[in-house]
Image (cartoon, rainbow, N blue to C red):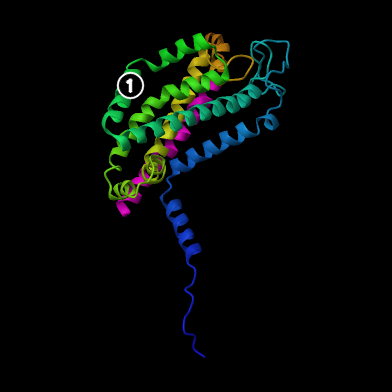
Amino acid sequence: MKMLSETPADTSPKRSSNAVAVVLRRTTPSAWFGLAIIVLYALIAIFASHIAPYGETEVVSSVPYGPWTQQTFLGTDQLGRDVFSRLIFGARNTIAISLAATMITFVVGVTLGITAAVLGGVVDMVMSRIVDAIMALPQLVVILVMLSVVGSSVFNLIVLIGIAGATNVFRLARSVSLNVTVMDYVEDARVRGESLVWIVFREVLPNILPTLVAEFGMRFCFVVLTISALSFLGLGIQPPTADWGSMVRESATLISYGDVTPLLPAAAIAFLAIGVNFVVDWFLHYASGLRDDH
């Protein structure tokens, strides 16, 4: 008996597999290398307590700046703490604090930037001029002054760096949003009487995400470097908490004796920045290819 109607076959798994195949085909070797670095750093940060042979502040030798041995793989610092263990804990502290500060930067900057573009007029002009005035001041100097006033706690460090970096993200979000706010679907949402929150987060934000994702990676690298620089100057993450910037400062004198120990935390910062930049560069090319396909 012939059926009157047939249910079309579900092709969603096929579509999904095709999409994955396209992504894999367009992924460059440098992107794979960068992704491997990011995953490695993330695993080290998450499982630092299980990977490190010693505690973060544990003194394992009575000899300051001890040599590289089987017990202390990368030697000891000026207090006899294991450098290898502190490098691992430094990954957890530096990455976690940088990620938190970057999240604050984007929540504040993106929200205000899109809002300024959507509202336009006087609101846009006032917000933009305030941001221009703030950006006229050297960011690192402002952070240094504020930290010297309010103190160098982890909370203050995250909030100050997050808010200071929001000005750059504000300008980027506003700039790309201006091209979206003139689209028909945004005008339709306004005619329907949708709220400002709806237009910002449902109409504009999804259409500028590729640019923001790329900027998030770049901004994260900048925050890592900023925190490391502040720690090197003594105003960032405070002892005895392990941090790559403070580790460079604490062992800087060893360079005079031909010891490469100060270069280890510096290399950790450099490799993280390289990995993130490789992935961001691939993502920008991939997003550009998708726009060309459409």
Residue type at mark 1: give it: Ile
* Residue 243 location, quadrant: top right
Does residue 65 appear in this view? yes
* Front one among 159 and 200: 200
**What residue sits 47% from the left and 84% below the top?**
4
* Residue 155 position within the rendered picture, expressed as x and y whole percent measured from the top left: 56, 21
Disc 1 secondary structure class: helix
Quadrant (top left/top right/bottom left/bottom right) for the C terminus: bottom left
Residue 262 is at least partly visible in this image: no
Q: Residue at x 65, y 18 (%)?
A: 75
Say left or right for 107 vs 193. Answer: right
Identify the image quadrant of residue 214.
Answer: top left
90 w.r.t. 279: above or below: above
Residue furthest toward the front? 193
Residue beneath disc 1: 130
Look at the image and give the residue range highlighted in magenta.
265-294
Q: Is residue 68 left or right of residue 21?
A: right
Q: Position of residue 103 (x, y in %)?
A: 49, 31
Q: Main secondary structure of the magenta part?
A: helix
